[in-house]
Image (cartoon, helix red, strand yellow):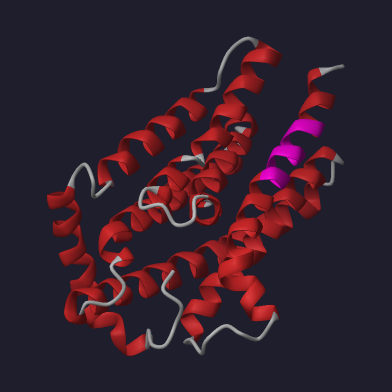
Amino acid sequence: MPIKNRDHLFYPALAILISATCFAGFSWTYFGPMVARSYPPAGAPLHLHGWSFFLWYLLFPLQAILVARDKYALHMALGRLSVVLVIVMTVTGILVLSVRVEEALRNGGPQIWLLYGPLFLSNLLLFVAFYAAAIRMAMTNRLQAHKRLIIVASAIVVGAGSARVLMLLSEFHPLSVPIGILACSLFIVIGIVYDWLTVRSVHPVYWIGLVAVLGVEASLFPQLNGDTVAWINQWIGALGEHLGVFYDPEPTVEF
């Protein structure tokens, strides 16, 4: 089978797998309770964050399918829409995270925010960095790098979903969150294996993404680097003090 035809099968399949992981993870903490009308009252920023992520992971495999079917004009138009989603995802994510960390520092709120707040933040910022690089590659017509950067970005931020899957499967083991977030690197490894099998070389984007996940995020495990995590939490909490006027964190689910 020609490489182009294999690509047209592989990339949509990988995108669907990544999105399915996201939906599986959030189905029991957010989407399921929302459908069942059992989710507790929460502010608009949290819902904007949740539904912008939902739309992103609907758009992600759709974009891969459009490329596979040579629907480039529609792909580019929806790509512009994705910029809006990323802005909403990022702004609301930082808002919710910083306010929850500030609340935990101030009155002993859910400790998960103090343990893993910096890890969640790094997850989001790495996503933005790789997504921005992907857009830059698209603007300069470097499409091989573009599609791999989108895979890396989407794989990194789906760590929030894979962590929830692992939490459920492990019956809330203390290490389920960091291991679940690092598990997103498996999608990058799949890309590495596919590159090697098809062209006998691996695009540098995948190696950069893998190093970023394993290096940056592993360094923020509280079990390994508690002092740094506590220091970053102070800065996140300070930001939350200023942003608290935009988001009332109570009552919400813990995670």
Give the magenta part as a residue range: 9-17
Q: Residue at x 16, y 66 (%)?
A: 234
**Image mark count:** 0
* Horizontal arrangement in the rendering, residue 255 relative to residue 192 (left or right): left
* Horizontal arrangement in the rendering, residue 9 relative to residue 115 (left or right): right
* Horizontal arrangement in the rendering, residue 253 relative to residue 137 (left or right): left
Q: Residue at x 53, y 39 (%)?
A: 152
Relative vertical location of residue 229 with respect to residue 139 in this rendering, above or below: below
Measuring from the top left, give residue 57's x and y in whole percent.
65, 57
Task: Please tell me which residue lies in front, 113 or 73.
Answer: 113
Q: Main secondary structure of the magenta part?
A: helix
Q: Quadrant of residue 101?
A: bottom left
Q: Residue at x 44, y 57 (%)?
A: 172
Measuring from the top left, give residue 126's x and y in whole percent.
41, 48
Q: Is residue 254 magenta?
A: no
Q: Quadrant of the N terminus?
A: top right
Q: Is residue 10 magenta?
A: yes
Relative vertical location of residue 188 with respect to residue 38 in this rendering, above or below: above
Measuring from the top left, give residue 125's x and y in whole percent.
38, 53
Relative vertical location of residue 167 with respect to residue 67 in this rendering, above or below: below
Measuring from the top left, give residue 216's x and y in whole percent.
31, 40
Task: Please tell me which residue lies in front, 96 or 41.
Answer: 41
Relative vertical location of residue 22 with respect to residue 15 in this rendering, above or below: below
Q: Quadrant of the C terminus?
A: bottom left
Q: Quadrant of residue 27?
A: bottom right
Task: Please tell me which residue lies in front, 53 or 148.
Answer: 53
